[in-house]
Image (spheres, coloured by chain):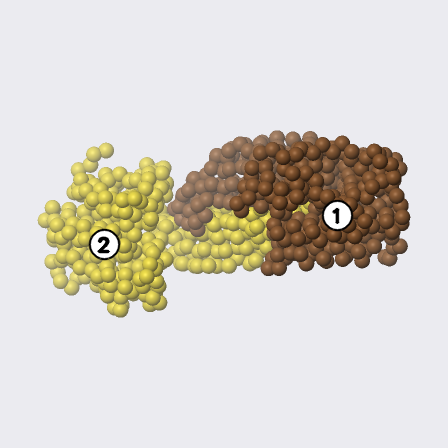
Chain colours: A yellow, B brown
């Protein structure tokens, strides 16, 4: 349907198309943080921010910030943003849609000649995706003051992260303390099928799920596949297959309630991997995501029981599950969530509340301010691929929700 | 127990120990066909054959043959043998025990001053194991006249198989027709746990199982592991895990009767294999072994039904099973089997009948003569590894069974 929105789809389309053209030409769409093509994209964005009347700067953490000063100095900052870097062979919308929507809020405010009480900052966070240095959310962690100091010494392609931040224009030695930010909002493509399947315009994100990665190693015995009777084997693969199905069942049960949960075995390998040898070893890496910590704790406990049960049933030794990494869920701010709901109603966006299964800069900004985010639909839930697609009309509608929310927050904070 | 056998354990131990020392020193026990170290082993064996009073030659197919002429020229040949080549990082007994036992039969006959009616030939078959040319049983296939002509052009390490056979002393252009062989016998380590578990000395091998290799490819969909709800996935791994367990169940059912059957998924891989991506593809390679062809036909039919059922249950596309290779089972000769049973009783060897799940030169010799084989126990059923182990006393006892069987066959054929 055609809506009479204060945000302009055409400007958003120009943002997204222009950035899509700033890519490794042999590998669209690739604009990885710290690369020359990323800096070219940043320069295009900086000019685009300035064309919208924003004052631009690079902060100590390497984030590009465009500021629209408010009427009342000292009232603090309302911040909007996302990221312009991509994964290799990534898409045109992941991150970019959020930067464009944030910028469009600033442009619409100028169109409407609205002056906010608060300063408005539009941010392109540095290196949200896993960069060449093997870590993610470098800029938002920096702005939240929680970027690990030892990360600065990480090296890749003959460069330390410290040098990379400096080349981007940041000051790696400085720890920022931003106590002026009153609220943070981000728009992002959903990267899942929920909104598209539900025919909805906007997801109001209640929480960024916690991510726990767990390794399980099955220690079977290599036997001759032809000569070892079926009942005399310690087959690591058939034991591991029981684990895979048990994990799927646990994940499905925990996902059956009102809160987001997902469990995936994304890495799976066996040894020796020869046609005529019973597999001796299997390794599983489980990725579990939970909106509520208690669900993750249940999963971890039931996984341990599953492993013991499969080992007892099959007679195959299985090492106790090993937690490789464990990040807590981040709830979004209830007041900002209510404001986003009200803004969606005001704009006429069909919306629902939902959790984010993926990580985002919002999770880090939530450490220092009231933060929340909205999702817009993307085609088939696909992301991190050149086929990633979102309608610019949906970005414009999401930006209108952000604009309405910013106006309300400006009055109410 | 100590037996008063006509075969001598000490000579067998010397055979096995001496050949074990002729190995790639950095990689025991490795004596791959067509390599310089293999030729060195062959030369040691040739002298050992001659020391036992045998006339030696290399036949057209590259097999080393030692002959003990019989009393009655034209009565034909009784042949005994196995192979002296190994896999990389192989064992000291697989093949070698059989060559040594065959040679010990000739030595024992000389000790006993027994002259047979038939000629006796002791054979070291060329390249029973998968050699550098990627094929197996080169010598026994050649002697049976069924070595594929196109194999001669196979190349590896700058050499064609044709040249390899020539370097060994064979004549690759000649197709042999051996219609003089009246019976063939082979001793081999079991390569499985059945004899050891049963406290038995000898297995009388009823058949060499047929081997069928079948590939199954699961076509799921790569989705974001964090954002794709559990119920909205087409997870190739969880579908493949159902296949693995279904194959194990089918194999166990078919193995439950009186005839050998085994089914193993030895190769298993997924794509893309990233922690945060739902697996899009899985590939299984199934190795199925059946003593009876009808069991294999049942397995293939039930596998097709399993694949359809899992695809329907999960909504994940699975390609129809693809047969990669398919070899029929080879029954051993009933008369020779009865003779071996009687010989085992005469020698006092605790024995049982059983099928061979592994392939052997006997399967090829069965095409041109009455053939059968016996197994002796090996430690933990292990083979194709440096830990492979058999007692030389067990080899000597098996050789005594062969000796007794040879005498009976010499009278009865």
Q: Which residue is mark 1?
A: B98
Viewport quadrant of the C terminus of chain A: bottom left
Picture residue at 30% right of the left edge, 49% below the top: A86
Determine the image quadrant of residue B151: top right
Q: Is residue B349 left or right of residue A138?
A: right
Picture residue at 84% right of the left edge, 52% below the top: B7
Q: Which residue is mark 2?
A: A39
Does residue B186 appear anywhere in the picture? Answer: yes
Check if mark 1 and mark 2 are on a common chain: no
For label 1, the SS is helix
Q: Nearer the viewer, residue A169 or B227?
A: A169
Report, in whole angstroms, how far the alpha carbon at label 1 lies from the one at label 2. 71 Å
Q: Nearer the viewer, residue B272 or A155?
A: A155
Q: Nearer the viewer, residue B237 or A18?
A: A18
Question: Which residue, as the protein is rendered here, is positioned at the far left?
Answer: A113
Does residue A235 appear anywhere in the picture? Answer: no
Q: Is residue B31 left or right of residue B234?
A: right
A92 to B47, vertically: above or below? above
Q: Position of residue A367 (x, y in %)?
A: 31, 61
B189 to A75, vertically: above or below? above
Determine the image quadrant of residue A352: top left
For label 2, the SS is helix
The mark closer to the camera, 1 or 2, is: 1
Q: Is residue A284 left or right of residue A386?
A: right
Q: Position of residue A301 (x, y in %)?
A: 52, 56
């Amino acid at each position: 349907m055609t809506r009479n929105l204060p945000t302009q789809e055409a400007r958003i389309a120009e943002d997204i198309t222009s950035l899509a053209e700033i890519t490794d030409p042999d590998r669209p769409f690739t604009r990885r943080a710290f690369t020359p093509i990323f800096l070219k994209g940043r320069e295009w964005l900086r000019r685009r921010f300035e064309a919208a009347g924003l004052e631009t700067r690079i902060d100590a953490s390497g984030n590009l910030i465009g500021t629209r000063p408010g009427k009342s100095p000292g009232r603090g900052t309302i911040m909007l943003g996302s990221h312009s870097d991509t994964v290799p062979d990534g898409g045109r919308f992941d991150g970019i849609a959020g930067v464009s929507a944030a910028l469009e809020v600033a442009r619409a405010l100028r169109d409407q000649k609205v002056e906010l009480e608060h300063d408005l900052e539009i941010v392109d966070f540095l290196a949200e995706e896993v960069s060449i240095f093997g870590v993610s959310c470098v800029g938002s962690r920096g702005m939240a003051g929680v970027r690990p100091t030892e990360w600065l010494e990480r090296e890749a392609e003959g460069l330390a992260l410290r040098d990379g931040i400096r080349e981007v224009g940041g000051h790696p030695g400085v720890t920022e303390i931003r106590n002026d930010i009153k609220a943070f909002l981000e728009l992002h493509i959903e990267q899942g099928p929920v909104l598209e399947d539900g025919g909805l315009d906007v997801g109001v994100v209640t929480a960024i799920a916690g991510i726990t990665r767990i390794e399980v190693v099955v220690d079977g015995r290599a036997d001759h596949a032809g000569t070892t009777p079926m009942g005399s084997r310690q087959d690591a693969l058939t034991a591991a297959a029981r684990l895979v199905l048990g994990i799927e069942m646990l994940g499905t049960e925990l996902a059956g309630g009102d809160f987001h949960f997902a469990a995936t075995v994304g890495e799976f390998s066996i040894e020796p991997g020869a046609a005529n040898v019973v597999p001796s070893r299997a390794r599983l890496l489980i990725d579990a995501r939970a909106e509520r910590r208690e669900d993750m704790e249940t999963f971890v406990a039931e996984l341990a029981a599953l492993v013991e049960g499969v080992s007892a049933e099959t007679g195959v030794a299985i090492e106790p599950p090993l937690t490789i990494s464990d990040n807590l869920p981040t709830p979004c701010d209830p007041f900002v969530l209510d404001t986003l709901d009200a803004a969606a109603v005001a704009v006429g966006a069909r919306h629902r509340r939902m959790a984010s299964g993926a990580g985002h800069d919002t999770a880090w900004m939530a450490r220092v301010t009231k933060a929340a985010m909205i999702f817009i639909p993307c085609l088939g839930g696909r992301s991190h691929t050149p086929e990633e697609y979102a309608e610019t009309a949906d970005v414009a509608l999401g930006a209108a929700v952000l604009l309405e929310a910013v106006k309300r927050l400006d009055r109410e904070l």
